[in-house]
Amino acid sequence: MDNAISYMSKYIRIIVHICALLPLLTLFWDLRFDNLSVNPIQDITFRTGKPALVLLVLVLSVTPVRKWFGLHSLIQFRRTLGLYVFMYASLHFLVFVGLDYGFDIELLLSSVFKKPYVVLGFLAYLTLVPLAITSTRGWIRRLGKYWKMLHRLVYLTGILAVAHYIWAVKSDIRQPLLFAAVICLMLFARIPAFNRSLHLLSERWTSK
């Protein structure tokens, strides 16, 4: 299967780009034809934040899935997915600061600490910034062994992002909790004993 992914990597990469851009394209379409909800700013905020979280979960899933199922070629898509996470998170941040608060820094600072979910979201975004900056091959060479250490920040990003989502939702938190469960699974996957157990299960599954 891994050989098939390697052979099809060019086409898979195109599909990854299309799927990653689809939420943004549909948002532009709905903006153009006035198909947003009665609260358009809230709608835009949600539709830039959720893709960031979905793609972040996919980024966190690459390494465990690669190890469990031997799909080593998946690693080549992690950087692309990570940059799309940063793009959507940046749009989400700009929508909040620009559309919600009109870039009024004084108003923003006076109210932001009254909303803990905003603080969590801002901290999650701050952790993404160094990851996006150092995602190039040049930075990988410069940082050497420290590059991997730095990019473990992505797990903190995941925790902060899902906590931000849970806290931001006013009523039904089932979907945020589902994201939290998946991110917890990806974190547990870093524990060697847990990882070995799942690897054995995957081998039994693929051998059937």
Image (cartoon, helix red, strand yellow):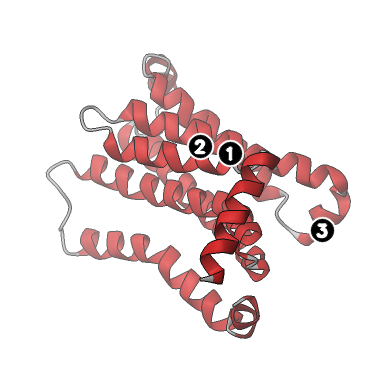
Q: Nearer the viewer, mark 1 or mark 3?
A: 1
Sort mark 1 into few (<14), some (14-19) or many (20+) by Cα contacts within 10 Å: some
- Inspect the image, locate mark 1, and give the three-letter code of the amino acid beneath it: Leu
| 84 versus 92 height, above or below | below
Query: Left of 179 or right of it: where is 87?
Result: right
Q: Secondary structure at mark 1?
A: helix
Whether tag 1 and tag 2 are in contact, CB under 8 A, the answer is yes
Locate residue 94 relative to residue 202 in the image: left or right: left
* Residue 74 image point, x, y percent: 61, 66
Where residue 165 sits in the image (x, y, percent)?
37, 34
Q: Is residue 30 above or below residue 92?
A: below
Marks 1/3 in contact by CB < 8 Å: the verdict is: no
Q: Nearer the viewer, residue 185 or 35?
A: 185
Q: Residue at x 46, y 31 (%)?
A: 121
The residue that label 3 is drawn on is: 138
Q: CA distance from mark 1 to mark 3?
A: 28 Å
Q: Earlier in the sequence, mark 1 or mark 3?
A: 3
Q: Which residue is mark 2?
A: 184
Q: Amino acid at mark 2?
A: Cys
Secondary structure under the numbered disc 3 in the rendered image: helix
In the picture, measured across the screen, residue 175 lies left or right of residue 112, that is left
**Residue for badge 1:** 187
Question: Is the residue 112 above or below the residue 57 in the image?
Answer: above
Give the quadrant of residue 118.
top left
Say which residue appears at 58% left-offset and 38% top-offset.
188
